[in-house]
Amino acid sequence: MTFLWPWALPLLLAAPSLAAAYLWQLRRRRREAVRHPDVSLVRAAAPPSRRWRRHAPVALVLLALGLLGLAGARPQVEAAVPMRERAVIMAVDVSASMCATDVDPNRLTAAQQAVRRFVSRQDRDTRIGLVLFSGFAQLAVAPTTDRQPLLEAIDTLTTGRGTVIGAAILKSVDAIAEINPDVAPASVDDPAGMLPSGPVTSGVSPTPSAPNGPGGPAPSGGQARAGGAVPEIVVLLTDGANTRGVTPQAAAKVAAARGVRVYPIGYGTTRPVSLVCTRQQLGGIEHGLPRWGGPGTRGSDGRSFLVIDEPALKEVAHTTGGQYFRANSADQLQGVLDDLPAKVEGERRQVEVSPALAGLGLLAVLGAVGLSVRWRVFP
């Protein structure tokens, strides 16, 4: 247990001090008691009572003083944060590599099914938002408790060229800033020079307002958050590597400065055999899928954009305080998403308990008053 106001702890001495004064008063009364020749007559005249009853109200008052003194120091304890108190931003990769058929029938279809199940199984009070990214990142559904627009957006995913993982993280931070005024939006100039490209808006589309947030964007300024991690989290599902724009590592520093944790999921195998998507998944337009190992699928360092950049994703998780997960198949992806609430709920945060202690102190005072009235000796 820790205390926000430790200087208030001396208030706890009030209870033992008053207890000592009460005991001294009892002894003084015994010394000054009036002697009577017929004790049996006094006992017969006095109403029946138990000796402990006259001390019970005093004990409750002393207990109340102790509880109120402890509450005044504003104690904090570690407690698990339930999933229903969080907002979850699902950032889903919809690049052309999601058409790979190494996951049956293809990566995108299996991901749609897994994400749909994840959304449907969350507590109805949990706000969920959806960020989609390929060549740019966009907030498809602002954080909401209404599952219908989320499920409709998941069922109609379409692919595009490119993978901007860094921009997706920044767009997710912006979505959280819409519902949490303690989180500064990422779509502002970066005064600390965290991002190599200056403004953090590279590859990021405008953010719509949250349907059930506090009503309006959070204050801008991009200042680091000193209060630790926020309850909102980002679940990043990608099967490739960043192709342009802000790097995932730079975006992770922006998220970490705001207390936003990112949980990346690396999805797919390292050898996708072919890329096949339905006409609907291609947006009704046959834009031509890149060939595995063909032109435009590798960066200057020889890394394939169609294969997970695990070092980058692990660094994102480490920087933001999240956790990295690997899913080679549809079943593994489903298992990761099914287990995610337990992983997140296992995290703990400092919770102030002074209101509860003050409430107990008030009940103790009311109990003392009630007992003193009920057990009074004379009417």
Image: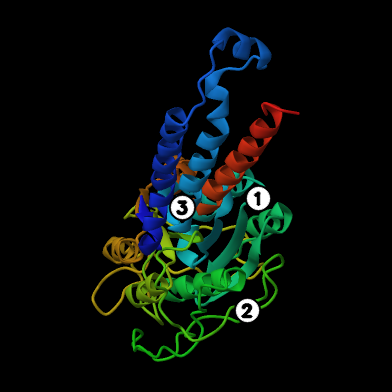
Q: Amino acid at mark 3?
A: Gly
Q: Is residue 371 left or right of residue 356?
A: right
Q: Secondary structure at mark 1?
A: loop
Q: Nearer the N terminus, badge 3 or badge 1?
A: 3
Residue position marked by numbered label 2 in the rendering: 217
**Foreground of the two, 78 or 321:** 78
Q: Nearer the N terminus, badge 1 or badge 2?
A: 1
**Foreground of the two, 69 or 242:** 69
Marks 3 & 2, CB-CB < 8 Å contact: no
Q: Secondary structure at mark 2?
A: loop
**Foreground of the two, 7 or 354:** 7
Where 279 falls versus 287 (above or below)?
above
Residue at 67%, 77% (x, y): give it.
Answer: 216
- Residue 278 spot, x, y in % from top left: 60, 57
Where 174 falls versus 146 (above or below)?
below
Can residue 112 be seen here? The reply is no
Residue position marked by numbered label 3 in the rendering: 69
Q: Is residue 40 left or right of residue 298?
A: right
Q: Nearer the N terminus, badge 3 or badge 2?
A: 3
| Label 3 vs label 1, nearer the camera | 3
- Residue 375 spot, x, y in % from top left: 67, 26
Q: Secondary structure at mark 3?
A: helix
Q: Amino acid at mark 1?
A: Asp
* Residue reaching furthest to the front: 37
Residue at 50%, 51% (x, y): give it.
Answer: 68
